[in-house]
Image: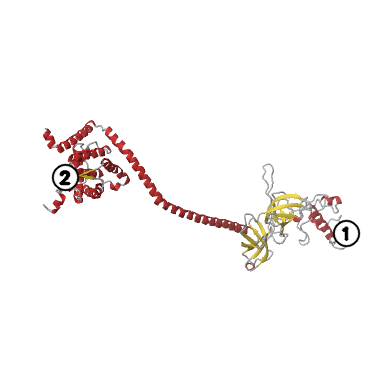
Amino acid sequence: MESFLSRYRNLSILLLLLVAQLLLLAYQVKSNQDVRLIRLWAVTAVTPVARVIEWARAGIAGAWENLFVLSDVRAENTRLRKDLDDLRLKNQMLAAELQMADRVKALVEFRSQIPSKTIAARIIGTGTGANTRTVYVDRGSVEGVKRGMAAISAKGIVGKIVAAYPTASLVQLITEQGSVAGVISQKNRVRGTLKGQGSGTLIVDYIRNEEKVDPGEWFYTSGTDRIFPRGLPVGIVKMVREGRGGKEVVVEPSGLENGLEEMLIVIDGVHGSIPEAETAPSSDISILPAPPEDAPVQQAAPVPGAPAAPQPAAPAGSAPAAKDLKTDADRLLEKYRRVGESQGIVLGTTKIRVPDFNRAPEAAKPAAPDATKPAPANPGPAAVTRQ
Amino acid sequence: MSSFDEGLLPNTPRRQTVSRFRIASWVLIPLAAILFQVYVRRLAAFLGYLELPLLVTVYFSLMRRQPVAGAITGSLIGLAQDSLSQHPLGMFGIVKTLVGYFAASISQRFDVDNHALRFILSFFFFLFHQFFFWVLSRALLGQSLDVPIPQSIIFAFLNAVVAVPLYAILDRLKTEER
């Protein structure tokens, strides 16, 4: 037996190994159980090595990615940053274009709403000088621009043309020192003269302390300056206080807000109306809508015992319109002027001839609508002073 | 006897040398082969055809020239491979035991340093390994594995192609001994 094993040693060991593994296999198949211990040893032995390999692989892959892939990412990042800058620049340009389009749209809309004939102009430069408030626009005498024309925007008046050249014009902004315009307040219809101060605000001069101007009130052009058509917004009152020679009213111009790029030059001005001030609606008080501005002024029925009021039938060139008589002094002066005219006397002349102010003016006689209640022929002085 | 036969048969003393390896090589090289087998499908699926534990078994068996050593080497590598697979322990063990035994037996008659012989043996033992594994699965486990023959031949060829340079690299780790 010993000689057999030694002679077939290789074969015996092979058979031994095979039989052992077959028995192991048969045990697993027969019992349907796994040899967990051997697998546990194998996995426990392999797992740390596998973990090290995986760690090394991940490290190498990460280094590779940092070396090559991230270099591409860096280049891509640089390119994307450049693209982002380009897009930001383009976005700003588009936003500016959009703002300009909005401004032009508002200007065109405003242009269609006002009765005056205008042409649009764009600012192409500013006047020389440290504190100058003049700008050049791209419209000149070729397009019909003349010196003295008004420049306005959708938000208000801008200035006036002080020089017209063939292809450009110089506009003196309303804020320039020495710039003036006739204005009237919206709510109280107080007239004054708007003056530029060389700063961002304007003052309204020649307003008496007795007249009422509220902060926040709007001023509109009155048209008396023969430059700006009546009814254009000028600005809003920022500050009001009483002064020595009259009220000190500071107005913030509305036409120069948020920068100015475009404007309208009034080629043929037409006076418009001044909008009524908005009042807060109240459910307790019934208020009729405002009468139309251009309707003829209806004279109130004469009060018995009182002289007839001045009639609007007076010649337009000799007497101001009734709606322009805002103060008692204006109305009294107009009454005296009419009395004088009815007696053939012109007030203010050198002739020393005083009219009889106790006689009513002839033009006022037929104004009474009610024939049953005629106006007295000679109203007393007390009646005159009541007006 | 032709010149080719003289080149393959170990008549000279040099060709009868037995290669020896360090213990670390005995442990780490099969372990690396098994780990490669474990990781190869996860990292590079296209290298899934490689049967590195088989190639290592063949190499160590050829170099040791001792059938017993070859059988033991094959059984250990096979069992280790079994323990990390879903198969019952012993399937790869039995097959690789036979591979190791036969490879070592062949190495006693041929010059295993010859690259052509290494290529042929690797090709042959891969097919043998696949065939015997199929037989064991069918006979012992009752499983009918589908083993496409053309694909097995191609895989055997590819493994043989890889085996030649792999064995050349492993040759640097051996210490020859008469």
Place of residue B143 in the rendered image (x, y in percent of width and height, measured from the top left): 21, 38
Place of residue A176 in the rendered image (x, y in percent of width and height, measured from the top left): 69, 59
- The vertical placement of A9 against A256, above or below, is above
Which chain is disc 2 placed on? B
Q: Are marks 1 and 2 on the same chain?
A: no
> Label for residue A354?
1
Place of residue A60 in the rendered image (x, y in percent of width and height, measured from the top left): 37, 47
Place of residue A168 in the rendered image (x, y in percent of width and height, measured from the top left): 63, 66
* Colour setting: secondary structure
Quadrant occupied by the N terminus of chain A = top left
What SS does tag 2 mark? helix
Callout 1, which amino acid? Val
Residue at x 20% of width, y 40% of height: B69
Query: What residue is pinned by disc 2?
Result: B106
Q: Compare residues B7 and B103 and report the one nearer the observer.
A: B7
Q: Compare residues A284 and B146 and report the one nearer the observer.
A: B146
**For mark 2, does the 10 Å Cα neighbourhood hold few (<14), some (14 to 19), or many (20 or more) residues?**
some
Q: Is residue A293 visible?
A: no
> Label for residue A22?
none
Callout 2, which amino acid? Ile
Residue at x 31% of width, y 43% of height: B39
Q: Which residue sits furthest right?
A: A352
Q: Tell me the quarter of the picture where residue B28 sits.
A: top left
Q: Tell me the quarter of the picture where residue B72 sits.
A: top left
Which chain is disc 1 placed on? A
> In the drawing, does residue B153 fall left or right of residue A7?
right
Observer-side mark, 1 or 2, equals: 2
